[in-house]
Amino acid sequence: MSEVLDALVIGAGPAGLGVSYFLKRQGRDHRVLDRGRIGETWRTQRWNSFRLNSPTIRSILPGDSYEGPEPWGAITHHEFVAYLEGYAERHRLPVSTQTPVQELTRDDGIFRVTTAARGVLLARNVVIATGDQNRQVRPPGSADLPAAVRQVDSSAYRNPAEFENGAVLVVGSGQSGGQIAEDLAVAGRAVFLATSRNGRWVRRYRGGNILKWLTLSGFLDVPRKELVLPSGKLQARALVGATHTISLQSLSAQGVVLLGRFRGVENGSLVFGDELDDHMRFADEVSANAKRLVDEYIERAGLDAPLAEDDPAETVAPRLPDPPIRSLDWTASGIRSVIWCTGFTGDFSWVRLPGALDVAGQPVHEDGVGAVPGLFFAGLDFGSTRKSGTIPAIPEEVAGIVERLVQVRRP
């Protein structure tokens, strides 16, 4: 039987590696397991031109500092994977790759992690750092599309050239949907975009990166409980381009045909709602509110920041279908492919711990501390605050998780 480790960390992405860094500093005997390679999701679920939305200086893990020439630049996912590998090597973190977890159980206060590669591993604590954005969600209507239409999730999209001739329908106008629609349009593809109710942020404002201002102002530190909508759901993250502002109006100016929300398939046609005007207005309002918050912070802090300038992506005149499109015959419109950018959820089917998950199979926790003693979750989207689930949140949040973990008495 295996020795009993102080902790097992499941997931060797940025959150898992950050947890490992702090565990090592505390002298805790632990191991990090990953189903694939370090940063597997960043390797396999990003498109070719993908760049991180968080600026480079905010994409640094605990114990590191940025000393390069472009602190507010946007690195590629390939560069980020290389950084993660180097981070694990520099800090000599105990990572075991190609070790998928088959089952997590608990017996007499000790966690049992069953793997095919290493058998059963035992630990007093477990930190699940796989995140909750690794299983794509499609709307029910996706099952009604004809077999001749190719369907791809955003996590499987790579580049425009992989699609055969014909138009592409992108469903969802959040970060992935907006960026992928632009990627296709720039390549000269015919693109339809079924929009959703997402906000928008400009990339730069008052002489600085918008994420810099939103961090300094405290906007990103708003607690999760204040962000929950009356429906019990959380508002999707705002659309922000990695290097420049992307808006619905700027996409339309590039030839993207804007539609309302995808409603399904009826009588052989794709059906859309009439929410386009509301979606555009909502995105404008979110952008204006974010800029107003930054203005108030700059004034309150007495900073000498440049005056606001109009962003071309927000001032360009939209080119909207007239009359609005409510249905499309997929053959007549030339749509041969659909890319679903409709969100993710977490796959925790291997967690066999009563009370650890809710009825939807998602973690029961408070700021990353699970309902089962000794169980923790790192890297959850909106887990504690508005910035939870993003790379800039990792140093502070994983430090808090490890601080709670080490309070557990050793036998």
Image (tube, helix red, strand yellow):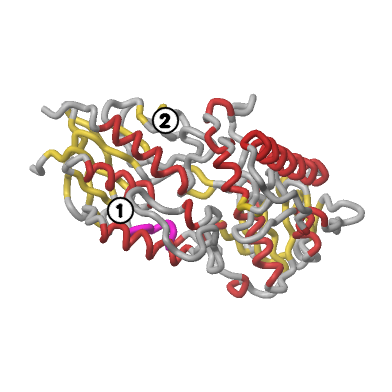
The residue under the point 32% across, 62% down is 85
Q: Is residue 41 left or right of residue 266?
A: left
Residue that appears at 52% across and 34% down:
221
Q: Is residue 176 above or below residue 406?
A: below
Of 319 and 62, nearer the camera is: 62
Disc 2 crowd rating (10 Å Cα; few below 14, some 14-19, many 20+) is many
- Side (left or right) of 88 relative to 59: left
Which mark identifies residue 34?
A: 1
Residue 259 at x, y = what percent? 78, 52
- Above or below residue 69? Residue 343 is above
Residue 42 located within the stretch drawn in magenta: yes
Mark 2 or mark 1: which comes first in sequence? 1
**Dot 1: what SS?**
loop
Q: Is residue 18 left or right of residue 281?
A: left
Which image quarter: residue 151?
bottom right
Q: Horizontal and vertical percent for residue 275?
A: 79, 42
Q: In this view of the protein, can residue 142 be seen by the observer? A: no
Residue that appears at 16% across and 40% down? 5
Secondary structure of the residue carrying numbered label 2: loop
Name the amino acid, label 1: Asp
Residue for badge 2? 367
- Foreground mark, 2 or 1, reads 2
Region rendered in magenta: 37-43
Coordinates of residue 136 in the picture (x, y in percent):
52, 50
Q: Which mark is residue 171?
A: none
Q: CA distance from mark 2 to mark 1?
A: 23 Å
